[in-house]
Amino acid sequence: MPELEVVASRYATNRDRRQLWKAAIKWPMYAVAVMPVLVAAGWHLARNQPLRWDQLLVFLLAAILLLAWENLANDVFDADTGVDVLGKPHSVVNLTGRRDRVATWAHGCLVLGLGLMALVAWRSSPAVLVLVLACCGLGYLYQGPPFRLGYRGLGEPLCWLAFGPLATAAGLLALAPAAIGGDQAPWAQIPWRQAIELGSGPALATTLVLFCSHFHQVDEDAAHGKRSPVVRLGTGTAARLVPWMIALTLAFEWAPVLAGHWPLTALLGVIGLPPGRALIALLRDHHREPDRIAGSKFLALRFQALNGLGLAVGLALGPLLRPWVGGPG
């Protein structure tokens, strides 16, 4: 694609390519991929269940590969619509000028990630692979033709569903002791109640990252027909939703503590609040200034990562600190 090669050449001469590649790799974003299984691990430890560390490590690697597929495929599909040509110099397609090569990388990550998930499922429950395939299907619906539901403003609910109940249920099953489930059919083993209770808050924090990624590119999205929630609502109204999303994330996580289902230490997820407050202030004061809010998604990501890790560690610490802080027996 010659036009992409021209774009790549222009960015090479006008910007620091090393910084662009750092932005393209987006390594902090992989916190969203690993969080469901880390929170599931904390949940198992909170119940004094033995943790299958080998399963955890393979699941983590597979999740990272699958999110790499999602990111690379998103660059490929956005290159087809032209939305990234001028507004996203760190698109891998823009940097390489080779859509075909990036598509091959994406397919490779998908095959490797699903292969590792198949191994995890073989050592636990077939339902793990089905749940992960459902997550990948939602990811394709979000970005892939002919659906492109992200262009219709539906990316956020798809994100919540994939990184919430589905991925969390897969993590809970993958890490469960082999004896759990007995002779039940694989589909009957899916712990939907626990997955919804455990995954709702962290998944909303992940959805906030996607939501905040739209603020600085409203004009470009609107020009190419991408009707994200921020385009539909306007930056002012969308910015006023951010405090509610943060508050609801914490409410989802505090309710099980108040109900006695989780140990008091699960409140450790509150350590994500400082970057959450900074995000609220940034978007409240500067939502009309794209250059100043370009990093808002990274503040959202910091909130997501600290909140999720705090929750996972807090759950895991519950049995150790129960004599002092109380909690479910």
Image: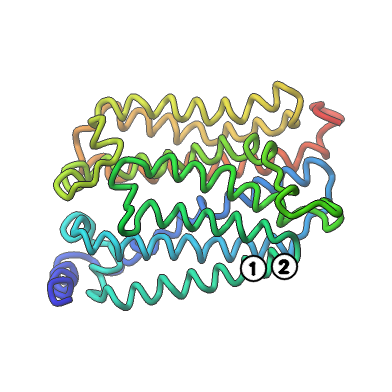
Residue at screen point 38% across, 51% down: 142
Q: Secondary structure at mark 2?
A: helix
Tell me the colour scheme of the image: rainbow
Q: Nearer the viewer, residue 46 or 220?
A: 220
x, y percent for residue 256? 69, 27
Q: Quadrant of the C terminus?
A: top right
Q: Is residue 298 visible?
A: yes
Residue at screen point 59% across, 29% down: 252
**Badge 1 is on which residue?**
118
Relative height, residue 249 to residue 161 (above, below): above
Mark 1 closeness class: few <14, some 14–19, many ≥20 residues within 10 Å: many
Q: Is residue 286 visible?
A: no
Mark 2 closeness class: few <14, some 14–19, many ≥20 residues within 10 Å: some
**Badge 2 is on which residue?**
122
Q: Quadrant of the N terminus?
A: bottom left
Relative to 55, is 100 on the left or the right? Answer: left
Q: Secondary structure at mark 1?
A: helix
Q: CA–CA distance between discs 1 and 2? A: 6 Å
**Tag 1 and tag 2, C-beta contact below 8 Å:** yes
Identify the amino acid type marked 1: Ala
